[in-house]
Amino acid sequence: MTDAEDTDEFVLVAYDEDGNEIPDDTDPFSGLKEDEEGSLDLTFGEHQYRRMEYDSNDRFAIYKLMAHFREDIVREGMIFCAGAGALGNEVLKNFALLGVGNLWFCDFDDIDASNLAKSVLFRPRDIGRAKVEVAAERLKDMDPDMTLVPLSADIRFGIGMGVFRRMDVLCSVVDSIDARVGFNRIAAALGKPWLDAGIGELSWRVTCWDPPGGPCFECTMDNAMRYQQHLPYAPSCAPMAEAIREMQRQPTSPLAAAMSGAMMAQEALKLLHDVKMETPPEQLEMPHGVQYYFGGGDPYLEAQVRRPTPDCEGHDFWGEVTEVREFTAERTTVRELLQKGADLLEVDLNKVSLRIGYDLVVEKYCHQCGTRTEYIKPQRARDLDLSCPNCDNEARPDYKRALRVFDKKFIDRPLADLGFPKLQIFLLYGGKGRIAVELTGDEAEVMGGG
């Protein structure tokens, strides 16, 4: 295109793959039809619909001219991002700029002064506020039309698995091996690939794990990582010196966050098209099980192919989920859930168990004063308090990993009383079988519209 002579004439020049100009001896638009608005239909197959028009009042107009991304898919897509720290800021910001229509994200931390040097969405006036709350405000300023659902919760205990089941793309930018393992188990149970990213001072990595058919995050874990998995949650970046000493935590920079955040968002859009389109463009094919690693000291980028590990526990697919629309976390009791499992598995109620999947503390006992106190909390929860309410000494936690009809203390209590989130999916065992049951009665309230 040229405006050298101040005319409205457009000059179209075509080039071949080697960059050589193609002589203008043919009409490049021959055979193409105009639509009702007079725009040329440049369809080269259903998945590459593009129009030669540009509306300067449309903030996403430029994306209509891109060769592969479909604006309708991006605007209708549902993406979940675990983490809203430095890297999470970059990923969320990119999603807003790209026009992602439905964005769910979670983090349970508040903003402190150390976050300000690495987080593009946070300001000094935000110190002390929840990260997700502030991030949602900034993202809404960027794109008022996007649907945002910020959650101040732990992905493993505070968000029903039914939420993840309804997402098109799952992303994790957490700073804990324990949380990554938890996210990996959720994705595997639901049969979903998921994206993972991490950063260092000068390095970063982005991976698409594929528990359904390829390698998962746990396939790559060595003994050192298994040890670190059982460390408590790392503090929110400060004081960094103490974190490095006590948590073996690595300092990070906004440079690594910006680079990996860009790649993470691009891979998320590729995965979104892969999920939503029957035949996505070849350029959007997802490299499942490939980890992109960037080393910044002597800059290089490499693609590391990961392989599945035989007998890895991170590949446990729960199978088809049974939706029970009359079940909710607040109204359905443990007994009713177990009875539904017995009916579906066609076994006696006494043979059914609800596998929790983690240590659920139900009571704490103080050896000093003999006080027993009901205390229901996941043992790996970040804010676990084992102090005795009577003498303030440390108490011993008593926990359960499964519930059965014989647990008289809990059997007739609503699931919410035991800390289970709304729209949760439970894995029930009975006889030689098992079945996944969802509290689908919570769907309208949790997902919107109720």
Image (spheres, rainbow, N blue to C red):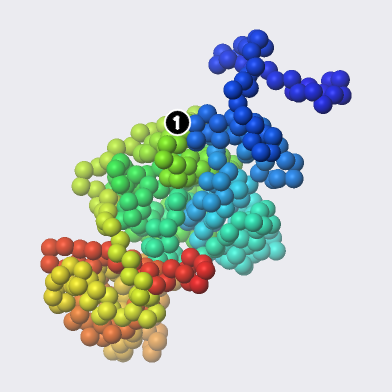
Q: Secondary structure at mark 1?
A: helix
In what quadrant of the picture does the N terminus appear? Answer: top right
Nearest the viewer among 121 and 269 is 269
Residue indicated by mark 1: 282
Q: How far from the left and from the top, in percent, is residue 378?
A: 35, 71
Q: Residue at x 37, y 39 (%)?
A: 288
Q: Disc count in the image?
A: 1
State the image coordinates of residue 169 (x, y, percent, origin top left). Answer: 45, 50
As shown in the figure, which amino acid type bears the numbered disc 1? Glu
Q: Is residue 15 visible?
A: yes
* Residue depicted at x 61% and y 67%: 129
For the question of whether residue 253 can be seen, the reply is no
The image shows residue 329 at horizontal and vertical percentages of 38, 76
| Quadrant of residue 364 within the rendered picture | bottom left
Q: Quadrant of residue 111?
A: bottom right
On screen, residue 415 versus residue 339, left or right, reads: right
170 lies left or right of 428: right
Toward the viewer: 59 or 311? 59
Question: Is residue 116 left or right of 278 when viewed as pictured?
Answer: right
Please determine whether, in this image, residue 333 is positioned above or below residue 247.
below
Check disc 1: other Cα within 10 Å, few if <14, some if 14-19, many if 20+: few
- Residue shown at 38% from the left, 69% from the top: 440
Q: Is residue 114 above or below residue 253?
A: below
Q: Residue at x 65, y 16 (%)?
A: 27
